[in-house]
Amino acid sequence: MSTIARKSTGVKLGAEFYRREDVVRIGRELLGKVLCTRVNGTVTRATIVETEAYAGVGDRASHAYGGRRTRRTEPMFQDGGLAYVYLCYGIHHLFNVVTAPAGTPHAILVRAGLPLYGIRAMERRRRRPAHDKAFMAGPGSLAQALGITTRLTGKSLLGDTIWIEDHGIVVPARDIVVGPRVGVDYAAEDAARPYRFRISEAARRNAPTP
């Protein structure tokens, strides 16, 4: 049976992880990493189980397509290792990891997670129990559980407010489901890019728990 194996305690990812050019590779490598927040003194952690890569100016699905540079998208044009958080439909706060060197606006949407630490705080924010299948099943619910809002956009992922840790979780290639991104039909042929990565449901059931 395929499993997700934990090898060590958490180590915060450094700038070198984020400032690479290959956004697709980073999108895969974020699976099994642990997204952490400290909001109003409360620390919460969730294992990342789904991501989507967005390849900047040449990707019609990206907010930075064609070099579009606005007040909202400005964090994407900075050195990798920042949070890019935007509001979707005026309701959902969606968290993205900015990657690549400055001037290359790559980003990775973190679409889903599994609660790992600070469960009670997450349940209060979500107003539902952590065992609910929809608890962190989408990017909006993930951000809500972790207390992520647009006020964190532009924040460094190297600091102590929002960051990502490597807990030595190894996700075998056979446990990664690859497919097109969700909700980007407007991107024409770019909508079919295989830039969405998910840990399989079977492997998730074997993921480390609190």
Image (tube, rainbow, N blue to C red):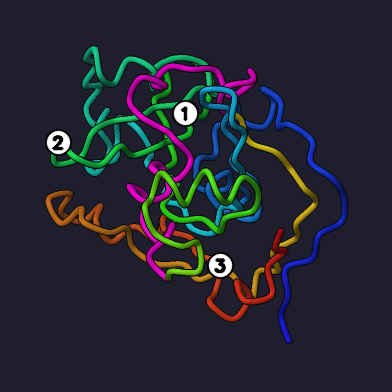
Q: Earlier in the sequence, mark 2 or mark 1?
A: 2
Q: Earlier in the sequence, mark 3 or mark 2?
A: 2
In the image: residue 186, left or right of residue 41: left
Other-residue count near label 1 (Cα within 10 Å), few / some / many at <14 / 14–19 / ≥20 = many
According to the picture, the residue beneath numbered tag 3 turns out to be: 199
Under mark 3, the amino acid is Ile
Q: Which mark is residue 98?
A: 1
Residue 19, image x and y in percent?
Answer: 60, 25
> Which residue reaches farthest bottom?
1
Vertical placement of residue 75 versus 176, above or below? above
Other-residue count near label 3 (Cα within 10 Å), few / some / many at <14 / 14–19 / ≥20 = many
The prevailing secondary structure element of the residues shown in magenta is loop
Under mark 2, the amino acid is Gly
Marks 3, 2: nearer the viewer: 2
Q: Is residue 151 magenta?
A: yes
According to the picture, the residue beneath numbered tag 2 turns out to be: 90
Q: Quadrant of residue 183?
A: bottom left
Residue 136, image x and y in percent?
Answer: 44, 57
Residue 79, image x and y in percent?
Answer: 52, 16
Q: Residue at x 65, y 48 (%)?
A: 117
Q: Earlier in the sequence, mark 3 or mark 1?
A: 1
Q: Residue at x 48, y 57 (%)?
A: 50
Per the rendered image, the range of residues in magenta is: 133-162
Q: Residue at x 47, y 28 (%)?
A: 98
Other-residue count near label 2 (Cα within 10 Å), few / some / many at <14 / 14–19 / ≥20 = few
